[in-house]
Image (cartoon, coloured by chain):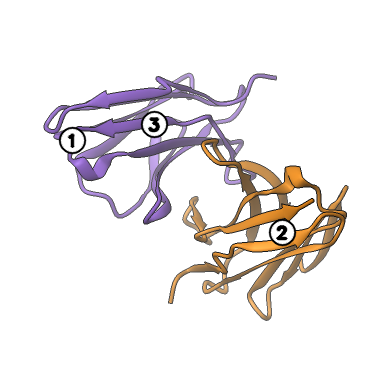
Chain colours: A purple, B orange
Amino acid sequence: KAGVTQTPRYLIKTRGQQVTLSCSPISGHRSVSWYQQTPGQGLQFLFEYFSETQRNKGNFPGRFSGRQFSNSRSEMNVSTLELGDSALYLCASSFDNTEAFFGQGTRLTVV
Amino acid sequence: QKEVEQNSGPLSVPEGAIASLNCTYSDRGSQSFFWYRQYSGKSPELIMFIYSNGDKEDGRFTAQLNKASQYVSLLIRDSQPSDSATYLCAVNIQGAQKLVFGQGTRLTINP
């Protein structure tokens, strides 16, 4: 079956702009989590959605937000981009708090 | 103290030998433990998960969990050059529906 699909794969944005990333989970999975990966900080949890509800949020500023739709697809939004937001953004899906499978990620570069 | 700790490496192992990767965690209530493999420029790939104390084997991989010592390890038998990657230990924090990752151990298998 199809894996986790993230779009776009690569993005270049300018400071101050906003960006929206998309994630389609594995069919049947209702939990979607988002992570930021940087060389310095490693993989850090952003937030997790289950059945359109945010169940948990990491320690990121309010510029980072997300949502989940009724078909379990999820989006995350980053407003007022900063240079430090340059990272690989990863989406992971799971059935419900079980094994999580990652998408290929979106590489965001802020210039 | 970090929630999940791994030796960053690099760990160098000759081809055909056993590679041993270790991870400790701080939350005694953690229930689920995962090992991901990440090749350079790629997203993390789930290779093992373990929920109960003891050993779990899957092909050349064995995960070991000791909740009393708050320790989880991954053994790779008959190491191959294709096993060269960064290995990430992840712990599902109790009640939080989120994975906390270690910084990863970079493993190199030398032919």
Q: Which residue is mark 2?
A: B51
Q: Report, in whole angstroms, how far the alpha carbon at label 2 lies from the one at label 1.
A: 39 Å
Q: Is residue B1 above or below residue A45?
A: below
Identify which residue is drawn at 71% across, 52% down.
Answer: B49
Q: For the residues tagged 2 and 1, is the chain the same?
A: no
Q: Secondary structure at mark 3?
A: strand
| Nearer mark to the viewer, of 2 and 1 | 1
How many other residues sit within 10 Å of disc 2, few (<14), some (14-19) or many (≥20)?
A: some
Q: Report, in whole angstroms, how far the alpha carbon at label 3 lies from the one at label 2.
A: 32 Å
Task: Name the quarter where the C terminus of chain A is drawn.
Answer: top left
- The mark found on residue A107 in the picture is 3
Q: For the residues tagged 3 and 1, is the chain the same?
A: yes
- Do the CB atoms of the residues marked 2 and 1 lie less than 8 Å apart? no
Rendered location of residue A34, percent (x, y): 42, 39
Q: Secondary structure at mark 2?
A: loop
Q: For the residues tagged 3 and 2, is the chain the same?
A: no
| Nearer mark to the viewer, of 3 and 2 | 3
Chain identifier of the residue bearing label 2 in the image = B
Nearest the viewer among A83 and B111 is B111
| Nearer mark to the viewer, of 3 and 1 | 3
The reply, left or right, for residue A12 in relation to residue A15 is right
User: Which quarter of the figure has residue B110?
Assistant: bottom right
The reply, left or right, for residue B74 in relation to residue B94 is right
- Do the CB atoms of the residues marked 3 and 1 lie less than 8 Å apart? no
Look at label 2 and name its amino acid: Tyr
The residue most toward the left is A16
Q: Is residue A13 above or below residue A98?
A: above
Q: Is residue A10 above or below residue B14?
A: above
Q: Which residue is mark 1?
A: A81
Rendered location of residue A31, percent (x, y): 52, 36
How many other residues sit within 10 Å of disc 1, few (<14), some (14-19) or many (≥20)?
A: many
Rendered location of residue B4, percent (x, y): 52, 67
